[in-house]
Amino acid sequence: DLCNGNVVFSHIYPVVIGETAIYGVLLVSLVYFFTVVIMCGLYVLHTSRPIEYKTLSLPQFPTLTKRKRVKSVFAYELQKQLFASKTLLLLIAVLLIKLYASRTGYHFEPTYTEQKYHSYMTSIQGEYTEEKRDALNHELSELYEIMGQKEEMERKYRAGEIARTEMGRYLVLFYEAEQNEKALVKANERLEFIKSQIENGKQPYIVYDTGWNELLASEIDAVLLVFIIAALCGIYSDEYKNGMNKLYSVCNIRALRRAKIGFCIGISVFAAIAFSAIETIIIAVNFTLPLCLTQASGIEGITLFDSLPLIAYYGLRVFAGCIFVSIFSLGVSLLSYLTKNKVLTFLLSLSLLLVLLLLI
């Protein structure tokens, strides 16, 4: 019953990915997954032996292999940034904000027209055939026939040729046909697009596209970029502030820089993937994401790499986003190294972010 959503989470709509229905328990599973990852990270960091300053001194290096020195430096940098700099708490807070904002922003109350559109598209989804197109056109012509009788029915009612109850029944049919006509026209436009894609040598499938349109229209979240700025603006400047930069002359500076670069990229990519996962689950709950293995050419607006499956195309977008946030995080860390001031780095990075958002 829990898996089918009959007892707990019965108020949450089912997630449909491909042909598989999963229920609201997936949301809780997502939060649980990130909690487990964070707790495992805490356990590993607290059970590992923290590096001491003498381990970084030049006289100690001959007793350690290069791999062990790099590993020790990275473990120390990871522990320092996550706990001493409160990055872990900031990450948890930002993920909770993203979860709340996504549930609110993508909350979907389908209109009658959207429900009918979903019904039509689900009934004909799959390979395109002329029979499916003819069936939609036939139903559409029947609706136009019903709607076209309105003036005649009103004339007959005013002339007393039909009773009030008969006129009432017709009006019910008329308003229902009016709503169905909007959904059918939208579905017919989708079939025309699919047909044009096939004529251009593509192999698209008919798919209910509302959820995919929402997912593929999403962009890199500004909250994610602000988190990266807040988390990394002190990665160098804090060390100049508390005097730890004096150790640079006696430690393996290359290993330390590699550790900082690794942390910048790692925390940024992890946050970006977490943001994308939350967004995907929320959209799938509210809109459904059917036929994820079919060609992306079945969705309007996709021009590059449209021969990829929808799930692969979305994965490519996430990968591109991870590259972008990695470069962005390195830029923030470079500003921290150049300015040696946390507040100045934060303000400069935020200003550059605002300019970037305005340009986009």
Image (spheres, rainbow, N blue to C red):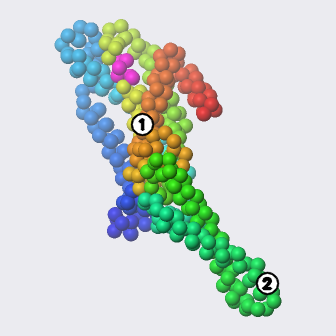
Left or right: residue 310 versus residue 358 is left
Q: What segment carries the magenta color?
A: 256-261
Would residue 67 be counted in the magenta stretch?
no
Q: Earlier in the sequence, mark 1 or mark 2?
A: 2
Label 1 close to label 2 by CB (< 8 Å): no
Give amino acid for label 2.
Arg
With 340 as the anchor, is 44 left or right in this view? left
- The amino acid pointed to by label 1 is Phe
Residues packed near mark 1 inside 10 Å, few (<14), some (14 to 19) or many (20 plus): some
Q: Residue at x 45, y 15 (%)?
A: 240
In the image, residue 8 sits, relative to residue 152, either above or below, namely above
* Residue designated by label 1: 319
Most common secondary structure along the magenta stretch:
helix
Q: Secondary structure at mark 2?
A: helix
Q: Is residue 257 above or below residue 152?
A: above
> Residue 114: in sight, yes or no?
no
Q: Position of residue 114 (x, y in %)?
A: 57, 63
